[in-house]
Image: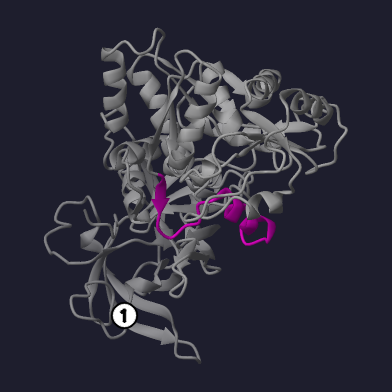
Amino acid sequence: MESNFIHDIIDKDLEEGKYTHEITTRFPPEPNGYLHIGHCKSICLNFGTAKKYGGKCNLRYDDTNPVNEDDEFVGSIEEDVKWLGFSWDNLNKASNYFDKMYECAVQLIKLGKAYICEYSADQIRETRGTLTEPGKNSPWRDRSVEENLAIFEDMKNGKYADGERVLRAKIDMASPNMNMRDPVIYRVMHVTHQNTGDKWCIYPMYDFAHPLEDAIEGITHSLCTLEFEDHRPFYNWVLESLGWKEAPQQIEFAKLNLTNTIMSKRNIKKLVLEGNAEGWDDPRLCTIAGMRRRGYTPAALRNFCDAIGVAKANSLIDMSQLEVFVRDDLNGKVDNKMVVLKPLKLIIDNYPEGQIEMLPIENNPADENSGVREIPFGRELYVEQDDFMEVPAKKYFRLFPGNEVRLKNAYFVTCNSIVKDEAGNVTELHCTYDPDTKSGTPGADARKVKGTIHWVEASTAVDLPVRQYGYLAYPNEETGKNEFDPASREDLVVKGEPGLKDANPGERFQFFRNGYYICDTVLSKPGAPVFNQIVGLKSSWKK
């Protein structure tokens, strides 16, 4: 893993002997949704940093808010981390530390650094002040330690309704940092927790739990995204107030933001609930599950995250840059197949009727050990609609009346005439072929043509459902925010060479001249595969 400013900090800490134990990081997702590409960057950074320094990285579930958390998300998180190629040293849950967190809250009360407040959430918000005006002290800010301890015990024992009492840190209501204006650190929530059951009816706030979780686990460097920068003073305040030795240090880095997609769990969940996405693993989504189903590879995502680096300022990365890494990882690694996405019938008038010959074709020209297969060729074929123009554009070298092209691994054909339907659409091309131009035979290349196109034999072609993908979202011109594009998926039934009907779920191919595709792992059945477009063959991204 390449060095970055975080590693420079760690190098300095090691040089100064700041920690007596090994470098330890953590990846701490909240199990309230599926992970996305932004989490992928954090996974690569945390696990990669631990590996670089011969340390440890924990997977920890920040399950301090039981309302939105679910075991389904827990399973998906573990699957995603493993699929990306990482393994954790310890699997932890914030909820396993609830007893210790409660003890720490009691300790703060005894130190005169926390108090029970009876304000509602709205009243706390109204009295917090603004960026230019200080907040107002709670009327209960100076309760006695004994009274605060007694009420906190009553809160724990279920004597108060949700929102009726909170425990607040006692810091400074005039602090220029809003996060230091007596933040709430415990609230009443009568909710069953998926791990602790009904043991607790009070739960710690994330900003209070976060530094304690890190400290309990011996985390040396707590790597967070930039939105936590303003929370760092409170992170440090908690640990300093409790006198924690060898306290972890929080370091912030820039989030990964991609164009033409929707990143936040909340907005992804909305797409799923409203039926605009077929699930958290919809191949258009930037969830790790969606990208896995789309056909992206773990290596491509890791290489992408390494290449964009770790910065201190947020930036926007073009989606096409990610596609470069996907394409580069697949290039030369998968077999080529003949598939026509938008079929147009081509009839070779001078080819013997009823004759089918088998033509050899390399499975993967980039891999000399991939072997050769045979595909059928006959009088009637399908070619791409885009490979014909009745009135050709300048420098168009494919089929048009009077022009000759090579059919991939087959013969030269010349377009002689066309058939149209009542609406004026071209439905058939009539051609002649030159039998002396069969690929691989002596003299076949005596003449040259500028265009080579692919094809499938009509009588043996199999119909294959294919899902073509555009970008999930585009920025609204007025708001600048990305909005879902309902036209981001196009369902086709294409014509493919016969062997594709036996494709296995998860198997990837290059459809010659069209792009990379994967046999869908959800919709495919034995003998009835469904294909997802992974990425096109050409990139629009420029360095």
Magenta segment includes 458: no
Q: Which amino acid lies under the numbered mark 1 shown in the image of this protein?
A: Met
Q: Position of residue 537 (x, y in %)?
A: 32, 55
Tag 1 residue = 389
Disc 1, SS: loop
Instruction: State which quadrant residue 194 falls in.
Output: top right
Q: Position of residue 196 (x, y in %)?
A: 77, 25
User: Looking at the image, which residue is at 58% across and 56% down?
Assistant: 267
Pick whichever, 401 or 175, lies toward us: 175
The magenta region covers 255-277
Pick whichever, 263 or 515, lies toward us: 263
Q: Is residue 486 left or right of residue 132?
A: right
- The answer to whether 306 is drawn above or below residue 242 in the figure is below
> From where the camera sits, is residue 269 visible?
yes
Pick whichever, 67 or 33, lies toward us: 67
Q: Is residue 439 left or right of residue 58?
A: left
State the scheme by which the image is colored.
Answer: one colour
- The answer to whether 338 is drawn above or below residue 142 in the figure is below
Q: Is residue 305 left or right of residue 268?
A: left
